[in-house]
């Protein structure tokens, strides 16, 4: 099977790493990729938001399967363009990807499907936003209706900060919307499911860490680390979420004539009143993908192609490692603000040579003058496995200590309280 992966972050490196280990994959390509992905796949330049360009590339490579990693190309309809050329594609259509592209659309789908979620208001004017903030009170949860790379959510007890974010989302006469909702207490869980629009196959749950600093302090980020499995979670959690969240959502989208085929990501809060959906994403999450795929033993390519071709009902039950996995994100100076780039990265070969159970997945990297340098906000995801979370965590941080990147920062408490 010839596979083309679209994207260039740590999520795509994790996907490519798993696909490169799959005996059914005879040729692996990635566009545009990064310095780390280049070690396991052939890279190609492409505008990932240009559906015609992606479809042209897939056709020229003779790709049997295209896997679209990031959310923006999905919302832009890239998967539709690939399928229109007769090429199998893992990723939802533009219409179905609105489940992530619009928080308001997701709330409407959940309401119709009876999916448990936070009460919310969709606001288009400052007056509506003020009324919603007043109705819910602190802590305030304010979400940009559109895509914001995981950083469009503000959770704060500061009314002025909440209102400022709401007004920024609405914009000055731009027709923007903001979703303001009740605060959900309890720990958060990420649960992925592969679906072909009818059959739903949940993966193993993970937990990520959104705040930039230790102790869940600082601004929201795209994610600073993750671990799986969750020893503290109810053993029946996955089955419950499949029954109350995943299947009803997939069924509702199919009923609307916009079947969702691809990766459905449910961000959940385990509240005192039960499981509630915080948000949906239409693709693999980053950094949770790094730990979930580290534990998946079923070859990945066949699973993704079964979803792309409507054959999940006949796919064998997934196999998982009993080991735990932990990933720690190393971010560049000033992230999640405007990051500094171009700094050399040291120690990569040291990790590869000395850490049997750890490896480095690249996010924002590139090659400059023969050296790997930073090229984005989140630069590396250091991932390790072990017989339990504590062992995997110790191995991940030992590998982190071997790396060097001037001005970089990372959290020191990923999975520490498990």
Image: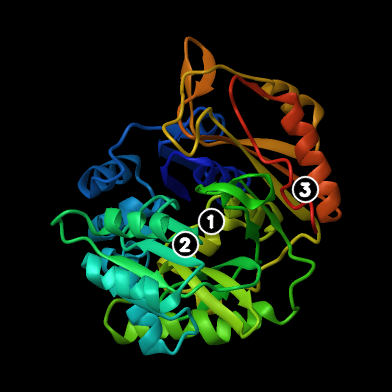
The residue closer to the viewer here, 297 or 311, is 297
Q: Secondary structure at mark 2?
A: helix
Q: Secondary structure at mark 1?
A: helix
Looking at the picture, the colour scheme in use is rainbow
Q: Is residue 78 above or below residue 279?
A: above
Residue 396 occupies quadrant = top right
Tell whether label 1 touches label 2 (CB within 8 Å). yes
Q: Which quadrant is the C terminus positioned in?
A: bottom right
Please provide percent x and percent y for residue 197: 40, 77
Please provide percent x and percent y for residue 211: 58, 49
Please provide percent x and percent y for residue 236: 71, 82
Tell whether label 3 touches label 1 (CB within 8 Å). no
Q: How far is the residue under mark 1 from the one under mark 3?
A: 22 Å
* Lower sequence index among marks 2 and 3: 2
Q: Secondary structure at mark 3?
A: strand
Please provide percent x and percent y for residue 260: 37, 73
215 sits to left or right of 147: right
Q: How far is the residue under mark 2 from the one under mark 3?
A: 27 Å
* Lower sequence index among marks 1 and 3: 1
The residue closer to the viewer here, 101 or 167, is 167
157 sits to left or right of 353: left
Specify the label residue 305 is tagged with: 2
Callout in the foreground (1, 3): 3
Query: Which residue corresponds to mark 1?
Result: 301
Query: Which residue corresponds to mark 3?
Result: 385
């Amino acid at each position: 099977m010839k596979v083309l992966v679209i994207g260039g972050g740590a999520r795509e490196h994790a996907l490519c790493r798993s696909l490169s280990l799959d005996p059914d994959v005879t040729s692996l390509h990635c566009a545009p990729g990064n310095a780390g992905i280049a070690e396991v796949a052939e890279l190609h330049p492409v505008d990932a938001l240009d559906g015609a360009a992606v479809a042209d590339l897939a056709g020229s490579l003779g790709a049997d399967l295209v896997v679209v990693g990031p959310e923006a190309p999905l919302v832009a309809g890239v998967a539709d363009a690939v399928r229109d050329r007769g090429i199998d594609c893992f990723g939802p259509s533009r219409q179905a990807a609105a489940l992530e592209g619009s928080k308001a659309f997701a709330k409407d789908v959940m309401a119709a499907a009876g999916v448990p979620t936070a009460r919310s208001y969709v606001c288009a004017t400052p007056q509506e936003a003020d009324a919603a903030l007043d109705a819910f009170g602190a802590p305030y949860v304010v979400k940009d209706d559109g895509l914001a790379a995981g950083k469009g959510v503000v959770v704060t007890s500061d009314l002025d900060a909440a209102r400022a974010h709401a007004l920024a989302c609405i914009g000055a006469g731009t027709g923007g919307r903001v979703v303001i909702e009740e605060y959900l207490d309890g720990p958060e869980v990420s649960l992925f499911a592969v679906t072909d629009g009818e059959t739903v196959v949940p993966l193993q749950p993970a937990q990520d860490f959104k705040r930039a600093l230790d102790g869940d302090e600082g601004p929201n980020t795209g994610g600073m680390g993750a671990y799986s499995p969750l020893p503290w979670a109810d053993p029946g959690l996955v089955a419950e979420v499949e029954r109350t969240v995943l299947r009803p959502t997939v069924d509702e989208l199919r009923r609307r004539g916009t079947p969702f085929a691809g990766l459905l990501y449910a961000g959940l809060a385990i509240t005192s009143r039960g499981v509630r959906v915080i948000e949906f994403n239409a693709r693999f999450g980053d950094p949770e993908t790094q730990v979930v795929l580290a534990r998946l033993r079923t070859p990945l390519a066949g699973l993704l192609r079964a979803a792309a071709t409507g054959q999940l009902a006949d796919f064998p039950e997934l196999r998982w490692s009993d080991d735990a996995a932990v990933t720690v994100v190393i971010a560049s100076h000033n992230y999640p603000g405007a990051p500094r780039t171009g700094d050399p990265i040291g120690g990569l070969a040291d990790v590869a040579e000395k850490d049997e159970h750890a490896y480095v997945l690249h996010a924002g990297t590139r090659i400059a003058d023969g050296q790997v340098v930073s090229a984005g906000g989140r630069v590396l995801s250091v991932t390790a496995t072990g017989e339990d979370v504590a062992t995997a965590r110790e191995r991940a941080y030992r590998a982190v200590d071997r790396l060097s990147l001037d001005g970089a920062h990372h959290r020191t408490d990923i999975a520490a309280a498990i």
